[in-house]
Image: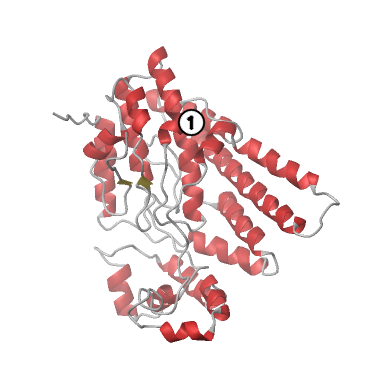
Amino acid sequence: MYQAAPISQRIIKIKERRKEHDNGHVSMCGERTKIYTEYYKTHEGEIAALKRAGALYEWCDKHVLSLEDDAMFVGNVGREWRSTVNYIEWGTDWLDEIMSMPEEDFIRDWQSPGAYAYISPEDREVYKEAVEYWRDRTLQSCVHAVLPEDIWKLLGDNCTSFGNRAKKGTANMPAGHYCANYKKVIDVGWGHIISQAQAQMDAHDGKLFGTDAKRYTTWRSIRLVAEGAKLLTERYSGFVAEEAKKASGGRRAELEKIADSLSWIAAHPARTCWEGMQMLIIYQLLLHVDAQAHGITLGRMDQYFGHFLEKELADGTMTIEQAQELADAFILKMGDYFAVQISSIAPLLPSFAARASRKKFTITKTAVTISLSAGSTKAEMTRRIP
């Protein structure tokens, strides 16, 4: 008979804090909207790939950092813990409607107890200004401008998704349902990717013929994104180090260790299971900030950092109980990226389970024992999974 793994007191405390926070304390943070809008305003002539990469780098540089009590990992999409953000460059329709609501209705729906997400007066002004700028500049507007006239005849036909799922046409939300190359980042580090991109750019120096300019721009964009990831991780390292000075006892030692590890993985490959998990979290965070919030699978995590776990259990630097707590904290952190339906785990760590003391420690047990709230991580299993 299957037996769920016990939950540590620390994880119970984090779960209880999540439950209390989600009961009327979630905010729709305007930080990303403000940073992205300001960047796009000052870079209107920049090519799309560089503009998108540059906006993400700008967010990495200006994002307000925070750290929760008892947190084992870092990374939030908004200023506040478990906040949601808006991808305004894709479409403004629904946000425009919210900003146009009568004052009494807006307060009732977005600034009252029980609201889906709280919008502060300051963020409301950010959204109002952003809607005015983006109304005819969104990706949706660009797509609509090039659609053939015959396509518009399908609008509202109730047979296609065009104009039925969304009130006005299509292309009003980002792409999703894919798996990024987390393993490469964990194996080689952001510093290597920066160097690789730079080497490709150097190889094209003075040799831009035909489609070479597009390739050069692509590598510039890749370098910029990797530099943003490195910068954000370095900023978190410094932030956690300062938080460690305010702590005492075991928590201080833990935060100092986290700060040191963040400093390392900012440019280098992971050395431990925790470092591999944190690098995946940073990568996942960047995907969400970049406006990819729909069904992003975490893929085969056992292949990313399962070998670190196996080694740490074998040499005694981690116990099975510590490993289970780490897995629980990791999955809870994945669920903190509140917007829409966050991350899928499919397939579900088949060999990772076997590596850890004959399935005593698995993400499967985490999925069974950790009850997650709306907008959480989703576990998927099929008969084809080993």
Furthest-right residue in this view: 206
Q: Secondary structure at mark 1?
A: helix
Q: Residues within 10 Å of mark 1 (few under 14, many from 20)?
A: many
In terms of image quadrants, where is residue 36?
bottom right
Work out whether residue 246 can be spotted.
no
Foreground pick, 271 / 362:
362
Residue 289, given in percent of the width and then of the height, sits at 49, 54
Residue 32, given in percent of the width and then of the height, sits at 50, 59
Furthest-left residue in this view: 1
Work out whether residue 71 can be spotted.
yes
Where 260 falls versus 288 (above or below)? above
Where 85 falls versus 322 (above or below)? below
Query: Which quadrant of the rendered structure holds the N terminus?
Result: top left
Foreground pick, 1 / 253:
1
Q: Residue at x 79, y 44 (%)?
A: 202
Foreground pick, 148 / 65:
148
Left or right side of 15 for 270 = right
Label 1 amino acid?
Glu
Q: Residue at x 81, y 57 (%)?
A: 209
Query: Which quadrant of the rendered structure holds the C terminus?
Result: top left
In terms of image quadrants, where is residue 299?
top left
Total marks placed: 1
Q: Residue at x 47, y 39 (%)?
A: 280
Left or right side of 363 for 122 = right
Q: Which residue is mark 1?
A: 275
Q: Residue at x 35, y 83 (%)?
A: 157
Residue 259, given in percent of the width and then of the height, sits at 51, 31
Furthest-top residue in this view: 315
